[in-house]
Image (cartoon, rainbow, N blue to C red):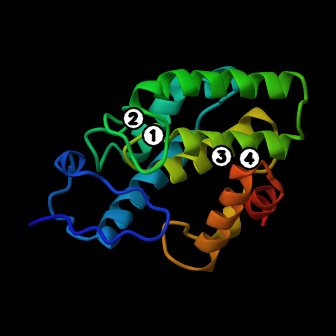
């Protein structure tokens, strides 16, 4: 049985080699995949709630990878590993580690020097990590969760609501989120901050 993935606007396709690393062989549609991934993501959220996390832990490559692994390790063999292929979004696969280290260092600097307000720091972090696109799949969900961890554990503010909707499904919330990301691509973060706090 093959994996039939009918992507919605803004989703990054999983290539055939990556599909071979699916751990649940009964999954055959994108809807089923989303359900299994969501269960795994909820376990990762529970894990984060039981941890004392500070900026020195959160803003590391190890934590970025560990969080992704915990979010998707019941579904994908490659969970927590940087992608080995180039995608329709993201930096070249060989630049992921360098660009991620730059982002982590930049974020530490923004916080230390109060370059932006806390919400803007968090949203800029989320936007940049999505643009790096370190993993084969789940980058949007990963960026939102790690940003929630950064804003709540690291900056001491309430976590974001991200429109209080499932952003993997087609609909108004996803459209608004993609519009806000496009504005952020042009350097304007107001819509993305507003969406994150809706």
Sequence order check: which comes first, mark 2 or mark 1? 1
Please give the residue where the numbered disc 3 appears in the rendered image.
127
Q: Dots 4 and 3: beta carbons under 8 Å?
A: yes
Residue 197 x, y percent position in the rendering: 79, 60
Left or right of 122? Residue 81 is left
Residue 6 or residue 122, whichever sits in front: 6
Residue at mark 2 to residue at mark 1: CA–CA distance: 5 Å
Please give the residue where the numbered disc 2 appears in the rendered image.
80
Q: Quadrant of the C terminus?
A: bottom right
Discs 1/4, front = 4
Q: Quadrant of residue 25?
A: bottom left
Q: Dots 2 and 1: beta carbons under 8 Å?
A: yes
Give SS at disc 2.
Answer: loop
Residue 81 or residue 25, whichever sits in front: 81
Kindly identify the residue that appears in the image at 89 percent across and 23 percent down. Answer: 113
Residue at mark 1 to residue at mark 4: CA–CA distance: 18 Å
Residue, far bottom: 171
Residue at mark 2 to residue at mark 3: CA–CA distance: 19 Å
Kindly identify the residue that appears in the image at 73 percent across and 28 percent down. Answer: 107
**191 relative to 159, above or below:** below
Q: Dots 2 and 3: beta carbons under 8 Å?
A: no
Sequence order check: which comes first, mark 2 or mark 3? 2
Residue 195 or residue 45, whichever sits in front: 195
Please give the residue where the numbered disc 1 appears in the rendered image.
68
Badge 2: residue crowd in 10 Å (few <14, some 14–19, many ≥20): many
Please give the residue where the numbered disc 4 appears in the rendered image.
123
Residue at mark 1 to residue at mark 3: CA–CA distance: 16 Å
Residue 35 x, y percent position in the rendering: 37, 66
Q: Dots 1 and 3: beta carbons under 8 Å?
A: no
Q: Quadrant of the N terminus?
A: bottom left
Would residue 5 be visible to someone looking at this image? yes
């Amino acid at each position: 049985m093959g994996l039939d993935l009918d992507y919605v606007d803004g989703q990054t396709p999983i290539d055939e080699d990556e599909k071979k690393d699916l751990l649940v062989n009964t999954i055959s549609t994108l809807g089923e995949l989303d359900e299994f991934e969501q269960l795994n993501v909820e376990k990762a959220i529970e894990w984060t709630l039981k941890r004392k996390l500070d900026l020195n832990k959160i803003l590391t490559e190890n934590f970025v990878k560990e969080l992704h692994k915990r979010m998707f390790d019941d579904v994908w063999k490659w969970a927590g590993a940087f992608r080995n292929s180039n995608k329709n979004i993201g930096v070249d696969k060989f630049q992921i580690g360098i660009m991620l280290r730059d982002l982590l260092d930049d974020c530490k600097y923004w916080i230390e020097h109060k370059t932006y307000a806390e919400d803007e720091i968090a949203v800029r972090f989320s936007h940049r990590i999505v643009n790096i696109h370190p993993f084969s799949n789940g980058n949007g969900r990963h960026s939102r969760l790690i940003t929630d961890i950064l804003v709540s554990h690291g900056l001491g503010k309430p976590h974001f609501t991200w429109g209080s909707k499932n952003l993997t499904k087609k609909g108004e919330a996803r459209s608004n989120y993609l519009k806000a990301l496009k504005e952020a691509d042009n350097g304007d973060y107001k819509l993305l901050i507003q969406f994150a706090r809706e």
